[in-house]
Image (cartoon, rainbow, N blue to C red):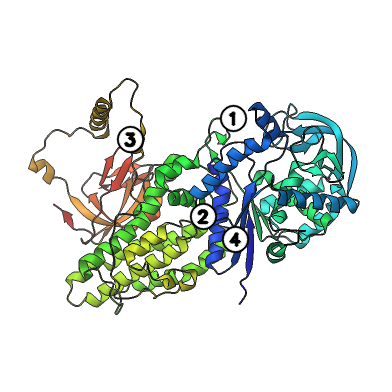
Amino acid sequence: MTKKSYYITTPIYYPSGNLHIGHAYTTVAADALARYKRMQGYDVWFLTGTDEHGQKIERKAKSEGKEPLEFVDDIVAGIRHLWDKMLITHDDFIRTSEDRHKKVVQKIFKKIYDNGDIYKSEYEGWYCTPCETFFTERQLAENQTCPDCGRPVELVKEESYFFKMSKYADRWLQYMEDHPDFIQPQTRRNEMINFVKQGLEDLCVSRTTFSWGIPVPINDKHVIYVWFDALTNYISALGYGTENDSLFQKFWPADVHLVGKDIMRFHTIIWPIILMAAGIEIPKKVFGHGWVLLAEGKMSKSKGNVIDPLVLIDKYGVDAIRYYLLREVPFGQDGYYSEEALVNRINIDLANDFGNLLSRTTAMINKFLGGIVAPPGEGTRFDGELIDMAKALPAKVEELMDKLEFSNALAEIWKVVNKANKYIDDAQPWSLNKDPEGKEKLATVLYNMVEVLRLTTILCTPFMPTIPEKVWSQLGISDRKDIQGWDSLSWGQFPAHTQINRGEPIFPRIDLKELELQEEKPGKGVPEDDKKKEQTNNLNAESFEAILPEISIDDFAKIDLRVAEVLACEKVEKADRLLKLSVKLGDEVRTVVSGIAKHYRPEDMVGKKVILVANLKPAKLRGIESKGMILAASHGEKLEVITVDDITPGGRVK
């Protein structure tokens, strides 16, 4: 049976310097989509590359005393290295300086010229060299600056060839009406339609004031405009118009172009009209995602606020970076990067939720079942809801992935991960182990836990590709490829009698303050041994609070510490640090306000058994009466709520 094909592209990147985390965002998203489609059985072709021509490159190369190709070669090597470190599984990497690309660009240009849609005239107008974009007077921002990047534009006057874009405006608008899903999300579609309705002007598609580009096939004094050149990569990489066009025949039209919102106009207006004029099918979809921003705005080398993904990978690991990018920012919207948010995602989602589920599961199988996964039998009253959620999860993830809702797909996976953690607290395997008649239920509970881990790990594979093998190793199924793929996402396939191999936590918690301390370089002129002593003394002096004055046993006896189960939890409005919790102590339910919101999300707390100071005088916080205080331990920026497992709510802590 022939596999269904799927063609996905990212923009080809302009090699003007090192890529930052925002650039990596697009390619990581494309890679997750490509991996997902491959797991589904599609024959995927994933293209990325570099856009290497234009006046900007020529000027930068000259400023460094290099030829343009020599200048870009070094930068392209760095881009390739980054994609390797990010585990990007592209099938092709195209450079616009390659002959295979140049020939196709010239062929398309000549074809459109022969059809009468390109003519020679003189261009006089405004040009932004950093963006390689032409603008009319009415399109400029204040003080004759680029409306996209805000930098000064140049007044250009030169002989040029023009592409009759205006001729195709009505046809383009009709295509948008007939294909409402071509431009996504909807906000971008509306922007592009409004832009075209204001009137399309013919596009200048050649330059004569520099030479670093592809010569116009009918006049080698001209080079082809860099965007006409660059956009053609999506079909030149497939061999369009060559003797070997099998890839073009198989994969075109592209299923999706993933691009940043700042280059939507080129990909959704200029590119489709070029294809219309050349008699070539238009891609099925162009999705314009938002930017990953810093608090001070968009990242740029000139601002000095670029976040290097290579540094982050070395500090936190590639899977954590990929997870953060795709979970933190809803695809299609802008999002904000901060290292604190990254560490919180690692500590809460990966360490507390997923990593803790794996650790608890393997620990209890070791302790209660001698390390062997027993077959399920009679269950508990808590099984049904968990199993139903797990069974429904693959279809939900598929629906969201097909809509490119990566963040929501991960959120659905984590709902099941969190449900499984709560299931452990509800089913209480430690209590079942003590009950002579509870052994079958114990086996069922632990089987359900490993099966949830198997399913959620498979679903996480496109996002975090190195994690599955670590999980399979601990679950003892590294050699069972038949139950690790997308086609094995049905409940109950984990093999009973499997020997598990409990290992180290796959996501250790991170103390950002300690990490920063470790990264400090020794001071100039200070011996290394003295520096280590200084750091140790600072750690002892600053990281740990001094012990309070002694109290008597009678003083301590006045404090009534109780185990309380969290039934519900929500954020307190307009209070960044506060959570409002409903907790159960025996038959009593209380409201407690706790300042842990920067360390725990509301859903993380539900089901936990915490230690409560039960006889603390009630206090009002943000208008809410809080009856008690939850105990937590802290060290630097790290804070953990103290929890217990095998104690009934209301039990006293002595």
Q: Residues within 10 Å of mark 1 (few under 14, many from 20)?
A: few
As rendered, which of 544 and 468 lies closer to the eye? 468
As rendered, which of 431 and 18 lies closer to the eye? 18
Q: Are marks 3 and 1 in contact (CB under 8 Å)?
A: no
Q: Is residue 368 above or below residue 617?
A: below
Q: Residue 238: give x, y in percent of width and height.
A: 69, 58
Q: Residue 610: give x, y in percent of width and height.
A: 26, 53
Q: Is residue 278 above or below residue 61?
A: below
**Which of the 4 quarters of the picture holds residue 479?**
bottom left
Disc 3 to disc 1, C-alpha distance: 29 Å
Q: Which residue is mark 1?
A: 302
* 447 left or right of 416 in image: left
Per the rendering, the mark at residue 407 is 2
Q: Residue 586: give x, y in percent of width and height.
A: 23, 61
Residue type beneath disc 4:
Lys
Residue 193 visible from this viewpoint: no
Of badges 1 and 2, the one in the foreground is 1
Residue type beneath disc 1:
Ser
Dot 1 or dot 2, earlier in sequence? 1
Q: Which residue is mark 4?
A: 403
Q: Residues within 10 Å of mark 3 (few under 14, many from 20)?
A: few
Q: Residue 470: give x, y in percent of width and height.
A: 37, 59
Q: Secondary structure at mark 3?
A: helix
* 36 left or right of 441 in image: right
Dot 4 or dot 3, earlier in sequence? 4
Q: Secondary structure at mark 2?
A: helix
Q: Which residue is mark 3?
A: 518
